Image (spheres, helix red, strand yellow):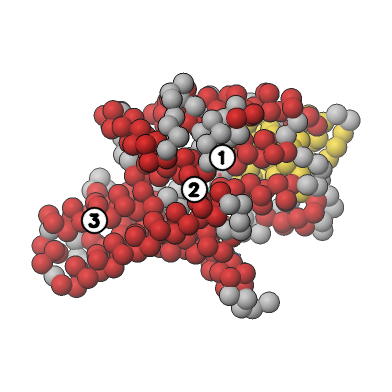
Amino acid sequence: MTQVPENVTEFREQVAEFLSGRAAHLDGWQYFRDRSGITADLYRQLGSMGWLSVSWPLADGGLGRSADFEFALWDEMAYARAAKPPIAAGLIARSIIENGTKAQKEFFLPGIAKGTLAFALGYSEPEAGSDLSSLRTTAQPDGDVYIVQGEKRWTSDAHHADYLWLLCRTGSRTSRAQGLTLLIADLASPQIEITPIETLDGHRVNEVRLDDVAIPIENRIGEEGGAWTIIQEALARERHLQVLPGRLRRDLEQLIEWAFASEALTSDATQRVIAEMAASVEAITATADEIVRLVIDGQDTLVISACQKLVGTDLMQQIARFPSSVGDQAQVIVGNPFEFMWRESILETIAGGTSEVMSSIVARRGLGLGS
Ligand SMILES: Cc1cc2nc3c(=O)[nH]c(=O)nc-3n(C[C@H](O)[C@H](O)[C@H](O)COP(=O)(O)OP(=O)(O)OC[C@H]3O[C@@H](n4cnc5c(N)ncnc54)[C@H](O)[C@@H]3O)c2cc1C
């Protein structure tokens, strides 16, 4: 295990050095294309150094550093386009730490910390995405198991993962958020069928059908009917990792390189738009620092994080589209620098909460508008 300095700036330098030493093995944007292979190896390397659990409590096998270390790690990874945080070491590990039994902690946390155990997130369904409280996958208690029947949709990485973090209904059909329970399903079960769905950026999400899958009651996280609070608290503890400004700094650098290499730099209008984007990246970087501080202080980040996701993901699209919007269409032809960024940036405004839902949080919860 690598020694992690007490000072977060030094840790950031350590991460940057680690990444520069591996630059030849990291294919830019690899994570977004396929999280097996190179990305899985990278997670295992991070795990072997203790970095995947850098901000977990010491008592749970982590390094006990504050959330800004975790932010520094993934912000550098985002700048290098090397990887995003795996959900297992983030919201799933934190939920197990806060709500899991001793046996669950002993079974799942060591593999997650080492990067050898992967999870997929089974929340969304064909008829439930933004409004998860309407989900239909049922889990019926039957002796010492739950029998699960239903379908999950847009499940990233289910085809590489070992387990599914499964949100399902144990209450009545009308029980909404109060009737939801979290279970851990073993994806090796023959009653689970995984079918690929290709996304616009060539990444793969999945449809996951669960047909009378028996899940032991000991794989339930928290109380029956207690999932809603657990998932909200886990999301709140993860908000500093939702929009990583390193990603935008790198995208902007690529845009500036393009501007230097093209005729576009000579136009005042182009210079002004790029300068405005650079100012937005600065604002997003400052807001990210503020969100980290609020997370460390245990304060509410719902509205500020919604603002950040709304503005940050929109800026990703603006940067990616800019060369073609000023006439350099070649940049978005397959294989050219802005092509993959353009396609991927579209998905960023949907995954993890759509822009419309973020606007609604800002309007209603932040500004008190509407009902
Ligand atoms: C690349 C990618 C990876 C994903 N990975 C996962 C994963 O691993 N696990 C998982 O569980 N899910 C995953 N998702 C699903 C994602 O969380 C949902 O797509 C998202 O929550 C939106 O849900 P939906 O697609 O059902 O759209 P809907 O909720 O049906 O929304 C359809 C449209 O209506 C709008 N809308 C909905 N509600 C409101 C409202 N209250 N106010 C205003 N407008 C509204 C939306 O903005 C959207 O434009 C992934 C999605 C993407 C794109």
Task: Check mark 3 vs ligand 1: CB closer than 8 Å? yes or no.
Answer: no
Q: Which mark is residue 241?
A: 2
Amino acid type, residue under disc 1 in the picture: Gly
Residue 235 position, x and y percent, is 61, 50
Q: Residue at x 82, y 58 (%)?
A: 174
Label 3 secondary element = helix
The answer to which of marks 1 and 2 sits earlier in the sequence is 1
Residue 155 position, x and y percent, is 57, 43
Amino acid type, residue under disc 2 in the picture: Leu
Q: Residue at x 55, y 55 (%)?
A: 294
Camera-side residue: 6 or 27? 6
Camera-side residue: 136 or 118? 118
Label 2 secondary element = helix
Gap in Å between the C-alphas at discs 1 and 3?
31 Å
Location of residue 303 with respect to 161 vertically, above or below: below
**Local crowd size for mark 2, using a 10 Å CA cut-off: few (<14), some (14–19), many (≥20):** many
Q: Residue furthest front?
A: 6
Gap in Å between the C-alphas at discs 3 and 2?
24 Å
State the residue position of label 3. 255
